[in-house]
């Protein structure tokens, strides 16, 4: 018997590592290879100018428009105006107050979202009750020897955050109450809630802001003026709570009837039932909806530019109208878009994480 | 909950500002020790925040002049940015004392909104921009030209009227925004580009080679822009009106922020009256005798303000044109201070 060994086969194509991954996902057969090459070609054609404009031939260093000599983006503009984009017209010597307020807020939020930290209940209460007072005193001043800074000097990213955070935090409790009202057995409470929700959901935010800034002052007695920022904040909160109410209602309706009946059977009163049984379960289901509303609100805050408040977007537009910087609005818009994207993406990722962490097997998903 | 209520009431008391409305604007301003000036949220050369966040512009200088006249300090102004829609409400409700916000003086506004125009600090109007190398001298040479214009505005209609009444033909190329119209003109899509001149100059700075683009001399529409005050307070109306007039008179008399101290000892009676050498003149205005001196010293005369903000010393480089003084061929004419 003569054994002829078969010739050694070449090693199988690698399926690991970068090359392997590409082979598996990008060049998997002739059609996919062609698709990859064609799409790759187009993306290079389209992306290259963007990359070239934004990074490779951009100007980074300097102080005036004369330092922008290349064809690319002029990030000098953003650099020169960064303080204004962040703080608006807040006096330069006082910006530490904004920094402090937002640092405390960031620390509190971090405390609340990191799972292992203790005493979450206390911190949450502090965040919702004490912190707004601290933040208000820090931002507005007038107490403890802090110089008063009127709201028309607030602006930039800090104003965007103030609008978004106040809108979000204030709208949630109102939203919960409205949703409970809409589900209530009491006819007057129910119809009032329904009317409120439907009216506010039926008008665009931009008209609410217009009303707040243009119409409302006409109804006040002569000589009484009412801070424009506060008017906008109230408008945003009223508007947002209607949307929040519908999100909360969605969560409440997803709770099986048995839970309500079980709570009733235990002899719990209405508020005990809601606070101890229903809302904790419902809020968990509402997370995607709530975060969705938050993200929408965060972006909607830029609408305040139509009532002359200088949020991040508006202050960028004003800066791009400075005769010394005319013509650099593209850079400004790109920068603002990036900032908005970072915040919204962050919120979206956190909500996904939260859903996973709170997932206790009650949801209908497999 | 109680704490929240307490907080809300503290917040509300902070935000409410009740001005004693019965008092005259002048008294209110003096008591408050600053002027509330309504400005745009960013129009190049007229009111726009600079790198330091300070408001600069021709309209801003008017407010600074009022502040210098009334309070002796041009920095005692708070600028309230307003959109076009809310500006008159803000003035009527007392949120601002002066509206200095590229506002066109028209009959309907002057007569129906409870406001008074205190003069004209910039004569704007629709004009045409063309490439310098075409060698055009007049709009009348634009027969048969293609013109880039923003759609749906009076600009488009004014142009059609003007060309028709002069028996000229033209092809309008319309765009949604002025920016697009100007960019298309820049890339050679049209022979000319038309909009209000103050804007046209701003847009020109964005073009590839701004120096190759010039404005034709004709101005085909009237857009007199000026400061506005509430009706019913004539004293304040006069103060704002004469603050502007003082700046114009100062230029006419050759007084500027650099030479105002020497000029104080001038023997020219007009200059003396402007700078407060003639007792009793400011009595009717209810402000200090040296109001004219303070305006010129701290803000400058009209020509200085023009050059610095929109004219030859600014990136906009707007031609003085019809905003020259009356004795130099323009429209800017201030009644005498005497």
Image (cartoon, coloured by chain):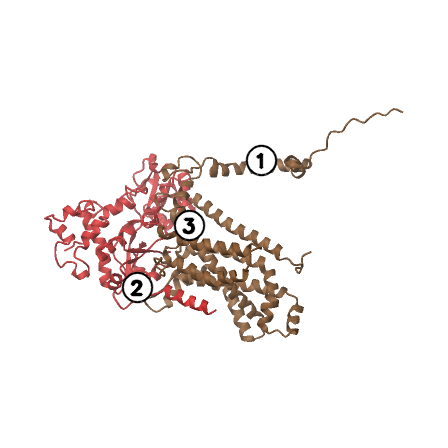
Chain colours: A brown, B red
Nearer the camera: disc 3 or disc 2: 3
Q: Position of residue B128 (x, y in %)?
A: 34, 43
Residue named by callout 3: A86
Q: Residues within 10 Å of mark 2 (few under 14, many from 20)?
A: some
Q: Chain of mark 1?
A: A
Q: CA distance from mark 1 to mark 3?
A: 39 Å
Would residue A202 be seen by someone viewing this image from the given angle? no
Give the quadrant of the C terminus of chain A. Answer: bottom right
Q: Position of residue A347 (x, y in %)?
A: 54, 53
Secondary structure of the residue carrying tag 1 is helix
Secondary structure of the residue carrying tag 3 is helix
In contact (CB < 8 Å): disc 1 and disc 3: no
Quarter location, residue A149: bottom left
Would residue B248 be seen by someone viewing this image from the given angle? yes
Secondary structure of the residue carrying tag 2 is loop
Residue named by callout 1: A41
Residue named by callout 2: B114
Quarter location, residue A273: bottom right
Q: Chain of mark 3?
A: A
Label 1 vs 3, first from the N-terminus: 1
- Badge number at residue A169: none
Nearer the camera: disc 1 or disc 2: 1
Do marks 1 and 2 share a subunit? no
Residue in the picture at 45% in, 57% down: A163
Nearer the camera: disc 1 or disc 3: 3
Vertical placement of A32 versus B286: above or below? above
Q: Position of residue B83 (x, y in %)?
A: 37, 56
């Amino acid at each position: 018997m003569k054994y002829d060994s078969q010739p050694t086969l070449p090693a199988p194509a690698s399926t690991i590592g970068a090359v392997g991954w590409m082979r598996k996902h990008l060049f998997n057969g002739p059609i996919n290879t062609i698709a990859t090459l064609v799409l790759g070609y187009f993306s290079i054609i389209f992306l290259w100018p963007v990359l070239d404009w934004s990074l490779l031939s951009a100007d980074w260093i300097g102080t005036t428009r004369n330092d922008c000599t290349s064809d690319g983006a002029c990030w000098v503009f953003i650099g020169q105006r960064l303080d204004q984009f962040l703080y608006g017209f807040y006096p330069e010597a006082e910006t530490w107050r904004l920094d402090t307020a937002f640092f405390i807020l960031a620390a509190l939020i971090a405390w609340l979202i990191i799972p292992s930290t203790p005493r979450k209940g206390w911190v949450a209460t502090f965040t919702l009750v004490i912190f707004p007072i601290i933040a208000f005193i820090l931002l507005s001043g007038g107490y403890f020897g802090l110089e008063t800074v009127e709201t028309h000097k607030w602006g930039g990213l800090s104003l965007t955050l103030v609008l978004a955070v106040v809108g979000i935090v204030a709208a949630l409790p109102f939203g919960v109450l409205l949703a409970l009202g809409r589900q209530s057995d009491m006819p007057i409470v129910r119809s009032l809630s329904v009317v409120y929700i439907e009216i506010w959901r039926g008008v665009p935010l931009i008209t609410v802001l217009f009303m707040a800034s243009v119409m409302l002052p006409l109804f006040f007695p002569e000589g009484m003026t009412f801070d424009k920022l506060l008017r906008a904040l109230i408008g945003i909160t009223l508007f947002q709570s209607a949307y929040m109410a519908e999100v909360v209602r969605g969560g409440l309706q997803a709770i099986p009837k048995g839970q309500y009946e079980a709570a009733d059977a235990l002899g719990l009163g209405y508020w005990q039932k809601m606070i101890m049984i229903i809302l904790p379960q419902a809020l968990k289901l509402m997370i995607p909806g709530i975060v969705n509303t938050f993200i929408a609100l965060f972006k909607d805050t830029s609408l305040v530019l139509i009532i002359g408040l200088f949020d991040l977007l508006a202050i960028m537009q004003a800066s791009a109208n400075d005769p010394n910087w005319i013509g650099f609005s593209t850079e400004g818009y790109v920068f603002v878009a990036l900032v908005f994207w970072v915040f919204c993406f962050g919120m979206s990722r956190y909500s996904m994480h939260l859903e996973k962490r709170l997932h206790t097997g009650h949801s209908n998903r497999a | 909950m109680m704490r929240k209520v307490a907080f809300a009431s503290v917040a509300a008391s902070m935000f409410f500002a009740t001005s004693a409305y019965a008092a005259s604007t002048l008294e209110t301003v003096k008591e408050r020790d600053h002027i509330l000036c309504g400005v745009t949220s960013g129009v190049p050369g007229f009111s726009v925040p600079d790198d330091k966040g300070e408001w600069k512009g021709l309209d801003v200088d008017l407010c600074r002049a009022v502040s210098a006249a009334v309070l002796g300090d041009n920095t005692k102004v708070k600028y309230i940015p307003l959109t076009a829609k809310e500006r008159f409400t803000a003035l009527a409700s007392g949120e601002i004392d002066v509206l200095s916000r590229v506002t066109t003086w028209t009959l309907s506004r002057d007569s129906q909104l409870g406001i008074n125009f205190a003069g004209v600090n910039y004569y704007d109007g629709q004009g045409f921009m063309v490439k310098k190398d075409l060698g055009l001298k007049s709009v009348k040479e634009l027969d048969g030209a293609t013109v880039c214009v923003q759609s749906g505005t009076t600009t488009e209609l004014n142009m059609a009227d003007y060309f028709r009444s002069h028996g000229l033909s033209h092809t309008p190329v319309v765009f949604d925004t002025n920016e697009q119209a100007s960019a298309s003109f820049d890339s050679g899509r049209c022979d000319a580009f038309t909009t209000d001149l103050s804007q046209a100059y701003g847009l020109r700075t964005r073009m590839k080679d701004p120096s190759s683009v010039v404005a034709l001399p004709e101005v085909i529409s009237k857009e007199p822009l000026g400061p506005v005050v509430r009706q019913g307070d004539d004293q304040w109306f006069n103060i704002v009106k004469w603050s502007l007039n003082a700046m114009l008179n100062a230029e006419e008399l050759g007084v500027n922020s650099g030479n105002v101290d020497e000029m104080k000892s001038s023997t020219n009676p007009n200059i003396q009256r402007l700078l407060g050498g003639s007792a009793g003149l400011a009595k009717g205005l209810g402000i200090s005798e040296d109001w004219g001196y303070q305006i010129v010293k701290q803000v400058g005369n009209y020509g200085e303000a023009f050059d610095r903000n929109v004219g030859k010393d600014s990136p906009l480089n707007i031609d003085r044109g019809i905003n020259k003084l009356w004795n130099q061929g323009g429209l800017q004419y201030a009644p005498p201070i005497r």
